[in-house]
Amino acid sequence: MEISYIFESKRLVFRHWSERDRNPFAAMVADPEVMRYFPKPMTNNQANQLVDRFETHMDDKGYTM
């Protein structure tokens, strides 16, 4: 599967979320150290729901996190 980039610079790449992003994202937001300034770490289900919201927002608005 080829990934298309929305924007690319020397240091950053902006692209749409993909299914392969879900597990690493869920692991990141489950880490208490990563989430120390947020209310609490997320479960896998919460992380997947958030990605679903990101994708819906992209479809509806044309931009997302």
Image (cartoon, helix red, strand yellow):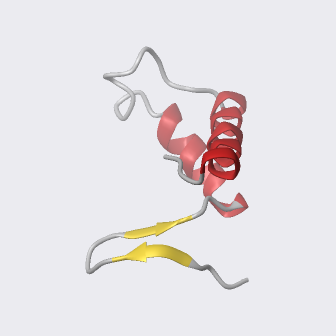
Above/below status of 55 relative to 30: below
Using the image as rendered, state which of residue 31 and residue 46 is in the foreground: 46
Give the x, y percent position of residue 22.
65, 51
Above/below status of 54 relative to 45: below
Q: At 71% across and 41% down in the image, what residue appears?
A: 52
Horizontal relation, residue 37 to residue 52: left or right: left
Quadrant housing the N terminus: bottom right
Q: At 48% across and 43% down in the image, what residue appears?
A: 28
Give the x, y percent position of residue 49.
70, 33
Horizontal relation, residue 47 to residue 34: left or right: right
Q: At 59% across and 79% down in the image, what residue appears?
A: 4
Above/below status of 25 relative to 41: below
Q: At 46% across and 17% down in the image, what residue appears?
A: 40
Query: Residue 34 occupies which quadrant of the picture?
Result: top left
Identify the residue at the far left of this view.
10
Above/below status of 58 relative to 30: below
Query: Residue 36 occupies which quadrant of the picture?
Result: top left
Identify the residue at the far bottom of this view.
2
Give the x, y percent position of residue 65.
49, 46
- In this figure, what is the number of numbered marks? 0
Identify the residue at the far top of this view.
39
Horizontal relation, residue 42 to residue 1: left or right: left
